[in-house]
Protein backbone atom coordinates (compact mmCIF):
# COMPACT_ATOMS: atom_id res chain seq x y z
CA UNK A 1 0.00 0.00 0.00
CA UNK A 2 1.34 3.45 -0.79
CA UNK A 3 0.56 6.93 0.46
CA UNK A 4 -1.14 8.03 -2.75
CA UNK A 5 -3.75 5.33 -2.14
CA UNK A 6 -4.04 5.82 1.64
CA UNK A 7 -4.01 9.59 2.08
CA UNK A 8 -7.39 10.38 0.46
CA UNK A 9 -9.08 7.71 2.60
CA UNK A 10 -7.47 9.04 5.78
CA UNK A 11 -8.47 12.59 4.86
CA UNK A 12 -12.09 11.48 4.40
CA UNK A 13 -12.14 9.70 7.75
CA UNK A 14 -10.55 12.71 9.43
CA UNK A 15 -13.03 15.10 7.81
CA UNK A 16 -15.88 13.10 9.35
CA UNK A 17 -14.11 12.83 12.72
CA UNK A 18 -13.81 9.04 12.31
CA UNK A 19 -10.34 8.78 13.85
CA UNK A 20 -10.68 5.20 15.11
CA UNK A 21 -12.00 4.10 11.70
CA UNK A 22 -8.99 5.80 10.10
CA UNK A 23 -6.60 4.01 12.47
CA UNK A 24 -8.27 0.67 11.72
CA UNK A 25 -8.00 1.39 8.00
CA UNK A 26 -4.30 2.13 8.48
CA UNK A 27 -3.49 -1.16 10.24
CA UNK A 28 -5.44 -3.12 7.59
CA UNK A 29 -3.75 -1.24 4.74
CA UNK A 30 -0.26 -1.81 6.12
CA UNK A 31 -0.85 -5.38 7.37
CA UNK A 32 -0.29 -4.58 11.05
CA UNK A 33 -3.24 -6.57 12.41
CA UNK A 34 -2.78 -9.27 15.06
CA UNK A 35 -5.16 -11.59 16.90
CA UNK A 36 -4.06 -10.14 20.26
CA UNK A 37 -5.32 -6.68 19.23
CA UNK A 38 -8.69 -5.76 20.71
CA UNK A 39 -9.08 -2.39 19.00
CA UNK A 40 -8.36 1.30 19.43
CA UNK A 41 -9.48 3.68 22.12
CA UNK A 42 -8.85 7.35 22.79
CA UNK A 43 -6.30 8.78 25.17
CA UNK A 44 -5.75 12.38 26.14
CA UNK A 45 -3.86 14.52 23.64
CA UNK A 46 -0.54 15.78 24.99
CA UNK A 47 -0.34 18.85 22.75
CA UNK A 48 -0.57 19.90 19.14
CA UNK A 49 3.11 19.00 18.58
CA UNK A 50 3.51 15.93 20.81
CA UNK A 51 2.27 12.41 20.15
CA UNK A 52 1.80 9.51 22.59
CA UNK A 53 0.24 6.12 21.86
CA UNK A 54 0.09 3.20 24.29
CA UNK A 55 -0.78 -0.50 24.16
CA UNK A 56 -2.83 -1.31 27.24
CA UNK A 57 -3.76 -4.66 28.71
CA UNK A 58 -2.38 -7.41 30.90
CA UNK A 59 0.64 -9.38 29.72
CA UNK A 60 -0.74 -12.44 27.95
CA UNK A 61 -4.11 -10.73 27.45
CA UNK A 62 -5.74 -8.75 24.67
CA UNK A 63 -4.25 -5.33 24.03
CA UNK A 64 -6.04 -2.08 23.21
CA UNK A 65 -4.02 0.64 21.51
CA UNK A 66 -4.85 4.06 22.87
CA UNK A 67 -4.48 6.95 20.42
CA UNK A 68 -5.05 10.71 20.66
CA UNK A 69 -7.82 12.27 18.57
CA UNK A 70 -5.21 14.45 16.85
CA UNK A 71 -3.22 11.40 15.61
CA UNK A 72 -3.71 12.24 11.95
CA UNK A 73 -2.59 15.85 12.38
CA UNK A 74 0.99 14.50 12.31
CA UNK A 75 3.24 13.36 9.46
CA UNK A 76 1.91 10.06 8.09
CA UNK A 77 5.35 8.38 8.17
CA UNK A 78 5.62 9.24 11.86
CA UNK A 79 2.05 8.06 12.55
CA UNK A 80 2.71 4.74 10.79
CA UNK A 81 5.90 4.19 12.79
CA UNK A 82 4.15 5.04 16.06
CA UNK A 83 1.24 2.71 15.29
CA UNK A 84 3.66 -0.07 14.23
CA UNK A 85 5.55 0.45 17.54
CA UNK A 86 2.34 -0.19 19.48
CA UNK A 87 1.30 -3.09 17.26
CA UNK A 88 4.68 -4.70 18.01
CA UNK A 89 3.81 -4.34 21.71
CA UNK A 90 0.50 -6.08 20.97
CA UNK A 91 2.51 -9.04 19.62
CA UNK A 92 5.04 -8.91 22.48
CA UNK A 93 2.23 -9.25 25.02
CA UNK A 94 0.37 -12.06 23.20
CA UNK A 95 -0.16 -15.42 24.92
CA UNK A 96 2.75 -17.77 24.24
CA UNK A 97 4.87 -14.85 23.07
CA UNK A 98 5.08 -12.68 26.19
CA UNK A 99 8.21 -10.59 26.67
CA UNK A 100 8.15 -9.88 30.39
CA UNK A 101 10.76 -7.12 30.62
CA UNK A 102 9.48 -3.67 29.66
CA UNK A 103 12.98 -2.47 28.75
CA UNK A 104 13.34 -5.36 26.30
CA UNK A 105 9.92 -4.65 24.77
CA UNK A 106 10.71 -0.96 24.34
CA UNK A 107 14.20 -1.59 22.96
CA UNK A 108 12.73 -4.00 20.39
CA UNK A 109 9.99 -1.54 19.45
CA UNK A 110 12.36 1.42 18.99
CA UNK A 111 14.78 -0.80 17.06
CA UNK A 112 11.84 -1.76 14.81
CA UNK A 113 11.12 1.94 14.17
CA UNK A 114 14.68 2.27 12.87
CA UNK A 115 15.13 -0.95 10.89
CA UNK A 116 11.63 -2.29 10.10
CA UNK A 117 12.55 -5.96 10.44
CA UNK A 118 9.07 -7.11 11.58
CA UNK A 119 7.12 -4.59 9.49
CA UNK A 120 9.20 -3.94 6.34
CA UNK A 121 6.20 -2.21 4.71
CA UNK A 122 6.44 0.71 7.15
CA UNK A 123 8.23 3.75 5.67
CA UNK A 124 11.28 5.40 7.15
CA UNK A 125 11.03 8.62 9.11
CA UNK A 126 13.21 11.71 8.86
CA UNK A 127 16.72 11.71 10.32
CA UNK A 128 15.40 13.88 13.16
CA UNK A 129 13.01 11.11 14.26
CA UNK A 130 15.56 8.36 13.59
CA UNK A 131 17.94 10.07 15.99
CA UNK A 132 15.19 10.48 18.60
CA UNK A 133 14.12 6.83 18.27
CA UNK A 134 17.75 5.70 18.41
CA UNK A 135 18.30 7.68 21.60
CA UNK A 136 15.15 6.14 23.13
CA UNK A 137 16.39 2.65 22.17
CA UNK A 138 19.70 3.39 23.89
CA UNK A 139 17.89 4.67 26.99
CA UNK A 140 16.00 1.37 27.31
CA UNK A 141 19.16 -0.61 26.57
CA UNK A 142 20.88 1.12 29.50
CA UNK A 143 17.92 0.35 31.76
CA UNK A 144 18.42 -3.38 31.10
CA UNK A 145 21.33 -3.29 33.56
CA UNK A 146 25.03 -2.95 32.91
CA UNK A 147 26.43 -6.24 31.58
CA UNK A 148 23.09 -8.04 32.07
CA UNK A 149 21.98 -11.04 30.02
CA UNK A 150 19.53 -8.77 28.21
CA UNK A 151 22.27 -6.34 27.26
CA UNK A 152 24.37 -9.22 25.99
CA UNK A 153 21.39 -10.51 23.99
CA UNK A 154 21.01 -7.14 22.25
CA UNK A 155 24.69 -6.13 22.00
CA UNK A 156 24.73 -6.39 18.18
CA UNK A 157 21.56 -4.31 17.78
CA UNK A 158 22.93 -1.76 20.26
CA UNK A 159 26.03 -1.37 18.08
CA UNK A 160 23.84 -0.88 15.00
CA UNK A 161 21.81 1.80 16.80
CA UNK A 162 24.96 3.58 18.02
CA UNK A 163 26.39 3.60 14.50
CA UNK A 164 23.13 4.98 13.11
CA UNK A 165 22.97 7.75 15.73
CA UNK A 166 26.61 8.67 15.03
CA UNK A 167 25.99 8.77 11.27
CA UNK A 168 23.12 11.22 11.84
CA UNK A 169 25.05 13.56 14.15
Image (cartoon, helix red, strand yellow):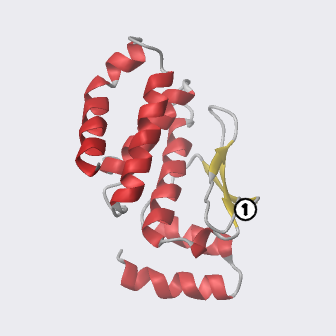
Is any atom of residue 87 visible in this view? yes
| 33 is higher (above) or lower (below) than 3 | above
Mark 1, Cα crowd under 10 Å, few <14 / some 14-19 / many 20+, is some
Is any atom of residue 96 visible in this view? no
Residue at 66% over, 74% down: 19
Residue at 23% over, 47% down: 167
Q: Position of residue 85 (x, y in %)?
A: 49, 50
Front one among 160 and 40: 160
Residue 61 in which image quadrant? top right
Query: To which residue does mark 1 refer?
Result: 45
Q: Position of residue 35 (x, y in %)?
A: 55, 49
Q: Is 97 on the left-hand or right-hand side of 38?
A: left
Quarter of the image where the N terminus is located: bottom left
Q: Position of residue 169 (x, y in %)?
A: 29, 48
Front one among 55 and 48: 48
Front one among 62 and 84: 84
Q: Is 13 on the left-hand or right-hand side of 92?
A: right
Judged from this view, the residue extending furthest toward the front is 169
Amino acid sequence: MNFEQVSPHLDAYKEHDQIIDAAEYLIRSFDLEHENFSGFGFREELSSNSLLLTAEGELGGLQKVMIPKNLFDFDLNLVLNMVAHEMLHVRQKAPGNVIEDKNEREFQAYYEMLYHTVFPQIPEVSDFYKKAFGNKAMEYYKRMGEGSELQQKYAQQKTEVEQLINSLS
